[in-house]
Amino acid sequence: MAEEITVSGFAKYRLERAKQDLSDAEFSYKNRRYLNANNRAYYAIFHAIKAVLALERVDFKRHKDVLAYFNQHYIKTEKFPKMIGKKISQASKVREDSDYDDEFIPTDEETRLQIVTARELIELVENYLKEKSTPNQ
């Protein structure tokens, strides 16, 4: 019989997945594989956001729906800083350019900023999940 996972356990699983994506982004960045680093940094961001949504049992098939919901319910309500919302939007654009625009050549600095954003969001999400799992909150 399959083990049943709790909502908070699923959120933690998604956060761990985000951390693995971040590790992959950092490895690619160190090896100057900027297109791949941008992709992995974005997915670190995406999976961190999905960790938050797991607490609500909310999920979407399309990336734009995940990002829109997070922006509406977590950025605009200031559960997360507005500045991180702008950084997430930029990260999404850079990932799309990296993945789909054959003429896009990412810079070292652009890619480094993607990783910084992913690291920042993961830390915010980790703190958010801890706060939500604290009894009597």
Image (cartoon, rainbow, N blue to C red):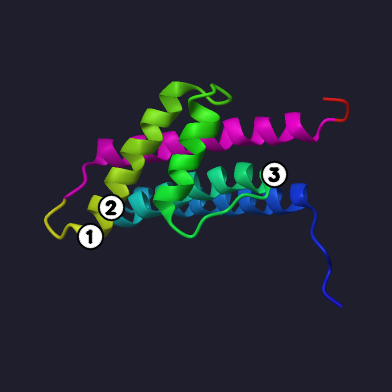
Figure check: 32 above or below 119: below
Going 46% across and 34% down the picture, which residue do you hit? 71
**Residue at 71% over, 54% down:** 10
Which comes sooner in the sequence, label 3 or label 1? Answer: 3
Question: Badge 2 is on which residue?
Answer: 96
Q: Quadrant of the N terminus?
A: bottom right
Residue sitting at x 56%, y 44%: 48
Callout 2: 10 Å neighbours few (<14), some, many (20+)?
some
Residue that label 1 marks: 100
Q: Residue furthest bottom?
A: 1
Task: Determine whether the residue tagged by mark 1 lies in a helix, strand or loop.
Answer: helix
Q: CA distance from mark 2 to mark 3?
A: 27 Å
Determine which residue is flagged by label 3.
55
Q: Can you tell which quarter of the image residue 2 is in?
A: bottom right
Q: Is residue 19 left or right of residue 129?
A: left
Residue type at mark 2 is Glu
- Rounded to the nearest angstrom, the CA distance separating label 1 from label 2 is 6 Å
Answer left or right for 23 relative to 115: right
Number of numbered markers: 3
Q: What type is the residue that disc 1 sits on?
A: Tyr
First in sequence: mark 2 vs mark 3: 3
- Residue 95 visible to an observer of this rendering: yes
Q: CA distance from mark 3 to mark 1?
A: 32 Å
Q: Which residues are magenta?
A: 105-134
Identify the residue at the far left of this view.
103
